[in-house]
Image (tube, rainbow, N blue to C red):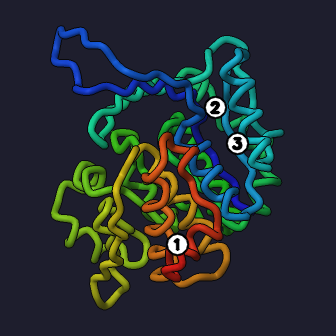
């Protein structure tokens, strides 16, 4: 089982023909509410590939919270350990989409109500997990507690450090994999990523969008190429990568194989609208890898 500890948001997506300048009001041409949150997205990505997945998070007692639970249940994700805040609303992400790019503002809401006590109540679930995925859209003390629980139980941790401002470098000793993008890596370590990679062999995996991903295997820098495609919506590509990486590693693939697998999954995800909407099935990934797509 893969357990995801993280955020659940309702994405409020506005598509437009240009990003507004400061003080400017423009007309958008489409609006949708789409289930999201980095935690929920990564849970869906892993579940859609066939993993048994549990989601630990917090939502509000509102219609958005009810919808997010229902969507995860439709993906066969265990939601019994999602708690409801008595006061905070469900988190939202305001996503502006223009010309294959996006700008996102997250309002955490109930996500910041997820406390160490909630994880303690789910300790048995965490301890029997094959891997735990964490992101940084929940309180830092909760992230720290989750990493500690996993360390005590010998459970591998895949930490996706987004947003990077919430990262604590002390976690590097205890996480199994860290998966920042190039911007996040620079913000966290403040040095050229080539230097940073050599300090964390087979642990630090830097995602580079369409260019793939890089890591250091202890002897050589490894570049795992991406798959060039025409992007429709890049929202959730990183979440797809992380969910797919966790799936592949739990299934016993080598790190090189798993990163390549995750790159292919991410390339498929950007070809459809919305984060969860574009997340691929296992069959779609293997079809692309084998060159069998129509």
Is 233 rendered above or below residue 48?
above
Image position of 228 (left or right of 34)? left
Residue at image x 26%, y 27%? 17
Residue 61 shown left or right of residue 271 in the figure? right
Q: Residue at x 38, y 68 (%)?
A: 204
- Whole-percent x, y for residue 94 in the image: 43, 24
Helix, strand or loop at mark 3: strand
Q: Which residue is mark 2?
A: 114
Q: Which badge, 3 or 1, comes first in the chain's sequence?
A: 3
Question: Between residues 85 and 78, which one lies in front from this camera angle?
Answer: 78
Q: Quadrant of residue 86?
A: top right
Q: Secondary structure at mark 2?
A: loop
Q: Earlier in the sequence, mark 3 or mark 2?
A: 3
- Front-lying residue, 85 or 98: 98
Q: Which mark is residue 56?
A: 3
Left or right side of 129 for 124:
right
Single out the residue that lies furthest toward the front: 294
- Residue 254 x %, y %: 53, 84
* Res. 293 mark: 1
Q: Nearer the viewer, mark 3 or mark 1?
A: 1
| Quarter of the image that includes the N terminus | bottom right
């Amino acid at each position: 089982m893969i357990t995801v500890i993280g955020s659940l948001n309702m994405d409020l997506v506005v598509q437009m023909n240009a990003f507004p300048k400061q003080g400017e009001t423009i007309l958008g041409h489409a609006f949708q509410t789409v289930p999201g949150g980095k935690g929920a997205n990564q849970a869906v990505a892993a579940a859609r590939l066939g993993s048994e997945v549990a989601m630990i998070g917090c939502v509000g007692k509102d219609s958005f919270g009810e919808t997010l639970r229902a969507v995860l249940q439709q993906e066969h994700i265990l939601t019994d350990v999602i708690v409801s805040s008595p006061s905070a609303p469900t988190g939202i992400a305001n996503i502006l989409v223009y010309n294959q790019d996006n700008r996102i503002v997250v309002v955490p809401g109930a996500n910041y109500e997820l406390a160490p006590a909630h994880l303690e109540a789910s300790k048995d679930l965490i301890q029997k997990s094959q891997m735990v995925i964490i992101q940084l859209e929940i309180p830092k003390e909760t992230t720290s507690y989750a990493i500690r629980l996993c360390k005590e139980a010998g459970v591998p941790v895949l930490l996706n450090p987004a947003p990077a401002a919430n990262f604590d470098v002390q976690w590097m000793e205890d996480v199994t994999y860290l998966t920042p993008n190039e911007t996040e890596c620079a913000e966290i370590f403040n040095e050229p990523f080539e230097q940073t990679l050599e300090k964390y062999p087979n642990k630090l995996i830097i995602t580079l969008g369409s260019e793939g991903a890089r890591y250091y295997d202890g002897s050589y820098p490894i570049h795992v190429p991406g798959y060039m495609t025409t992007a429709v919506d890049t929202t959730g590509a990183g979440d797809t990568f992380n969910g797919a990486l966790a799936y592949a590693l739990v299934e016993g693939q080598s790190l090189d194989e798993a990163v390549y697998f995750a790159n292919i999954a991410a390339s498929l995800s950007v070809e459809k609208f919305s984060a969860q909407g574009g997340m691929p099935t296992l069959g779609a990934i293997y079809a692309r890898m084998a060159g069998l797509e129509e």
